[in-house]
Amino acid sequence: MDDISIYFVYPGSLDTPTGGYHYDRRLIAELRELGMEVHPLALPGVFPFADSQALEITRNILNSVPDNAVVLVDGLAFGVLDNLVAEESQRLRLIALCHHPLALESGLDEATRQAFLASEKRALQYARGVIVTSPHTRQILTSKFNVPGNRIAVALPGTERCSFAQCDGTPPRLLTVGSLIKRKGHDLLIESLAALRNLAWSARIVGDSSPDPDWAVSLKQRVIALRLEHRIEFIGPVEELQDEYQNADVFVLPSRFEGYGMVFAEALAAGLPVIAASAGAVPDVVPSSAGLLVPTDDQQALTDALRSLLTDKIKRSELQAGARSAAESLPYWSDSARCVAQKIREVNQ
């Protein structure tokens, strides 16, 4: 048991239905199971697009933390708090939790992207430790953000064990899980499905519209314009996803970048064959035995992969078996917490 007290700082609400917040929630719970005292501190929800008011509120929150405390800050905020963490770096023992660098979000204008690159690179220099969710993100931080490798701990997200999906839908049922933001590539998927309207399939898109409402509306309008609204269903956010995985035949999400991709691991845990883009850490999560990975932003390759699994039941069954095999080696949340706890101990010394 660890007799260590830490402050866990994050923007907005821990109940936000994204993979990053799910990671935060589970990490807090598992660290407490290890005996650590965890004090959650919520910042304004506008990060990373913080205005002066949000930054002042954040300054006051950090100022309230006692001297020499270990403070773990979610990267959605940490990356734009370069000035503040510079001020607090001697007084507090700061750890950054980087799900993926802010500048790698899709849809940013070049000025914002460069600003995020500069601020996150500077902020990370003041972190005594950095937690990342994949070896791929670790490599990015060492090569492009000049973070020393010995400061970084890789804590892969955990995955709950579950029964395997039957994958017996007629027609095949496609499942997509991810917030309706540009980075997730829903636009590519919709266009590919339109090109395959002559085949039998149905599709469910599970995800929150609130992070980018205009983009979400454009996706739904595109489905209507293509006259696919009876075959592509937007479900909205779902708190408990197991029923979605259990009732699917293929998981597909052509993200343009993923720092890890928890939903891919969850799909594998349910024994689902996967179609994805070979972007970011996705190839580290989805083995070739369990999925078809296509080049990022390659519309034709995505269409071909979908056609392959929709028309070749034998191939689909082979990847289903590969997913079931891959599920056996997925980490548990307790494994994630132990990695983070070790870095916390190092910083606390």
Image (spheres, helix red, strand yellow):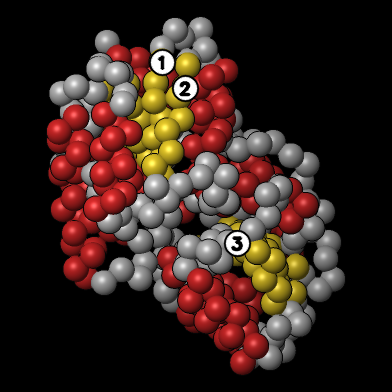
Disc 1 marks which amino acid? Ser
Whole-percent x, y for residue 170 in the image: 84, 71
Spatial separation of the CA atoms under disc 3 and disc 2: 29 Å
Can residue 164 be seen here? The reply is: yes
Say which element carries label 1. Answer: strand
Whole-percent x, y for residue 55 in the image: 27, 46
Q: Earlier in the sequence, mark 1 or mark 2?
A: 1
Tags 3 and 2 in contact by the CB under 8 Å rule?
Answer: no
x 69%, y 66%: residue: 235
Tags 1 and 2 in contact by the CB under 8 Å rule?
Answer: yes
Nearest to viewer (mark 1 / mark 3): 1
Whether residue 294 sits left or right of residue 56 in the image: it is right
Q: Residues within 10 Å of mark 1 (few under 14, many from 20)?
A: some
Q: Is residue 238 above or below residue 146?
A: below
Whether residue 107 sits left or right of residue 85 in the image: it is right
Say which element carries label 3. Answer: loop
- Residue linked to disc 1: 5
Spatial separation of the CA atoms under disc 1 and disc 2: 6 Å
Q: Earlier in the sequence, mark 3 or mark 2?
A: 2
The image quadrant of residue 84 is top left
- Residue linked to disc 3: 207
User: Which of the labelled discs sits on residue 38, or is there none?
Assistant: 2
Whole-percent x, y for residue 68 in the image: 25, 16
Say which element carries label 2. Answer: strand
Whether residue 257 sits left or right of residue 81 in the image: it is right
**Number of marks:** 3
Can residue 295 be seen here? The reply is: no
Whole-percent x, y for residue 274 in the image: 61, 59
Disc 3 marks which amino acid? Gly
